[in-house]
């Protein structure tokens, strides 16, 4: 399906942008925040963490890659002519095949509301049907026949980097029947 393919492509490029920003000077605030939270992106490469700078830049990056604004709107990355994510740590959310289907963003400063923001639902991203970290954890879950469910991104990442890998998290929502089935 072309619509799905386009959404995957846009999300992949956005992931590349946010990850790149986190490694650069413009991503210093994100780097410092992760340090404070004792999160080491080097040990969490599978999660492809990123940072959305307060100055934006995603639209410019996407234009250079030949992606028009309409496709960014469809992917939920732009709303009312503004980039959705600003000054946030970015958590790409993967489906079971390892494709990025959406994003979670954590505001760097606590006054940023909402503190956590997810991509809007799309044909490929339905919050109640996916769990954060499930793609990275599925082999470990199979091997151990056990899944550990935690509340949020940071809980998951700190355990994962301590080598506890059979772990996933609902996306800020109550656990749904679909999510339970996925885990099983």
Image: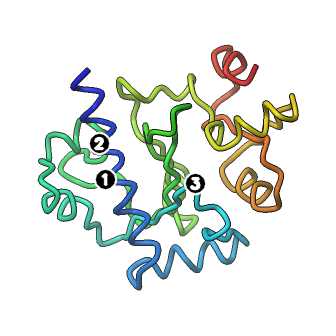
Quadrant of residue 24 within the rendered picture: bottom left
Residue found 40% across the figure and 55% down from its top: 15
Q: Quadrant of the C terminus?
A: top right
Q: Quadrant of the N terminus?
A: top left
Residue found 20% across the figure and 57% down from its top: 62
The alpha-carbon separation of the residues under discs 3 and 1 comes to 15 Å
Where does residue 131 sit, x and y in percent of width and height? 62, 33
The answer to whether marks 2 and 1 mark residues whose Cβ atoms lie closer than 8 Å is yes
Where does residue 96 sit, x and y in percent of width and height? 56, 31
The alpha-carbon separation of the residues under discs 2 and 3 comes to 17 Å
Classify 10 Å Cα crowding around label 1: few (below 14), some (14-19), many (20 and above).
some
Judging by the rendered image, the residue that carries numbered circle 1 is 13
Judging by the rendered image, the residue that carries numbered circle 2 is 9
In the visual, does 73 lie left or right of 124?
Answer: left
Front residue of this view, candidates 98 and 37: 98
Front residue of this view, candidates 151 and 44: 44
The vertical placement of 55 against 11, above or below, is below
In the visual, does 48 lie left or right of 123?
Answer: right
* Helix, strand or loop status at disc 1: helix
Judging by the rendered image, the residue that carries numbered circle 3 is 47
Residue found 13% across the figure and 58% down from its top: 63
Where does residue 155 sit, x and y in percent of width and height? 75, 53
Where does residue 102 sit, x and y in percent of width and height? 43, 40
């Amino acid at each position: 399906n072309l619509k799905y393919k386009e959404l995957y492509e846009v999300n992949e490029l956005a992931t590349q942008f946010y990850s790149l920003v986190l490694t650069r000077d413009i991503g210093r605030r994100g780097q410092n925040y992760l340090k404070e939270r004792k999160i080491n992106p080097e040990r969490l490469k599978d999660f492809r963490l990123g940072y959305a700078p307060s100055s934006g830049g995603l639209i410019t990056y996407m234009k250079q890659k030949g992606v028009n604004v309409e496709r960014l709107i469809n992917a939920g990355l732009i709303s009312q002519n503004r980039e959705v994510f600003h000054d946030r740590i970015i958590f790409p959310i993967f489906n079971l095949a390892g494709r990025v289907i959406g994003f979670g963003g954590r505001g760097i400063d606590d006054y940023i509301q909402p503190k956590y923001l997810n991509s809007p639902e799309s044909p490929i991203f339905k919050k109640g049907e996916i769990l954060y970290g499930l793609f990275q954890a599925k082999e470990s879950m199979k091997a151990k026949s056990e899944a550990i469910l935690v509340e949020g991104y940071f809980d998951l990442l700190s355990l994962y980097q301590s080598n506890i890998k059979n772990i996933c998290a609902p996306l800020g929502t109550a656990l749904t029947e679909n999510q339970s089935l996925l885990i099983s």
